[in-house]
Image (cartoon, grey):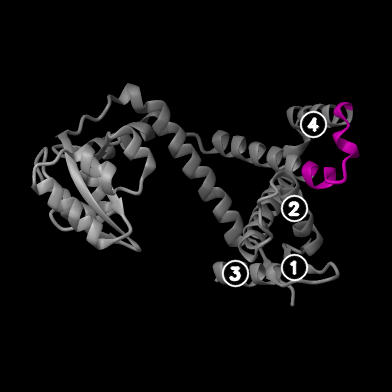
Amino acid sequence: MKAKILTSVALLACSGSLSAQTLATVNGQKIDSSVIDAQVAALRTENSRAEDSPQLRRALLNQEITNTVVAQEVKRLKLDRSAEFKDMLAKLRAEAEKSGDDKKPSFKTVWQAVEYGLNGRAYALHIAKTQPVSEQDAKAAYDNISGFYKGTQEVQLGEILTDKEDNAKKAVAGLKAKKGFDAVLKQYSLNDHTKQTGKPDGYVPLKDLEQGVPPLYQAVKDLKKGEFTAVPLKNGDFYGVYYVNDRRDVKVPSFDEMKEQIAGDLQAERIDRAVGALLDKADIKPVK
């Protein structure tokens, strides 16, 4: 239901209007179309190639809704009354005044983004404090990761990417004729980076391919080092031929090596869930 409401609200943002209108209310607080107009203008000022599109306005409005919900929660929790919050806000304001940025036409929009950033940081720190990740949590996550990859292998894949099936078949024929992978790659691939380097990228665990790209996993899982896919894989408008440059057992780093990263990932997940919970219980209404 919440997703449908957000979609309805976003569609309103995409409809053009000569006058400002309320696009939505979030727990009774209005979001005006002029806010989205100003954000679009600011983006286009920074990047002249940015297009004013329905997709951009949808993304900006959904972000505005999220920022509004977080700002409301920060105010409810009185996080914006902390000395650290006030000091940072004052410092940034002083810097803007000193540089003259506060006199620019887009300053109101830019300053709102600054306040949203401080709100987001304050709320993230609040969640980190009230829902901390313990070493036990990190160890449990590590054990899951270690168990997931235990006894599995990873492959270093070379890819010859073409937009014509006939060229992909010619690439396969070249490899079957014992031509070097680098030579066939440079002759047929559309990927300029790999054509220049002639080298495959890093290793990818087969378990990751199995979950993320099942067709590619099925095509390469049984290939030995030096073998390649005899049938090109179609992906949208492109065709790929894959060469196994190397394969080896997956070696999961030690817990001490991964502890900090895992804890950070777990904390980020808790913050995302907390923001999601705020959105779920928020009263978001599109205005027709």
Q: Nearer the viewer, residue 21 or 90?
A: 21
136 left or right, relative to 148: right
Q: Which residues are magenta?
A: 98-111
Residue type, numbered disc 4: Lys
User: Which quadrant is the C terminus positioned in?
Assistant: bottom right
Amino acid at dot 2: Gln
Cα–Cα span, label 3 and label 4: 35 Å
Of marks 1 and 2, which one's residue comes earlier in the chain? 1
Q: Nearer the viewer, residue 132 or 219?
A: 219
Task: Report the residue at 39% width, 33% height from top.
Answer: 262
Which of the 4 image quadrants contains residue 40?
bottom right
Q: Are marks 1 and 2 in contact (CB under 8 Å)?
A: no
The residue labelled by disc 1 is: 23
Which residue does the numbered mark 3 point to in the structure image? 7
What residue occupies the far right of the structure in this picture? 103
In the image, is 269 to the left or to the right of 145? right
Q: Label 3 to label 1, Cα distance in Å?
A: 12 Å
Q: In terms of sequence position, does the residue under pointer 3 or pointer 4 come before the other? A: 3
Mark 3 vs mark 4: in front: 3
> Which badge, 1 or 4, comes first in the chain's sequence?
1
Q: Which mark is residue 86?
A: 4
Give the labeled residue for mark 2: 39
Q: Amino acid at mark 3?
A: Thr
Q: In the structure shown, which secondary structural element does the residue marked by tag 3 occupy? A: helix
Establish if 154 lies above or below 275: above
Q: Are marks 2 and 4 in contact (CB under 8 Å)?
A: no
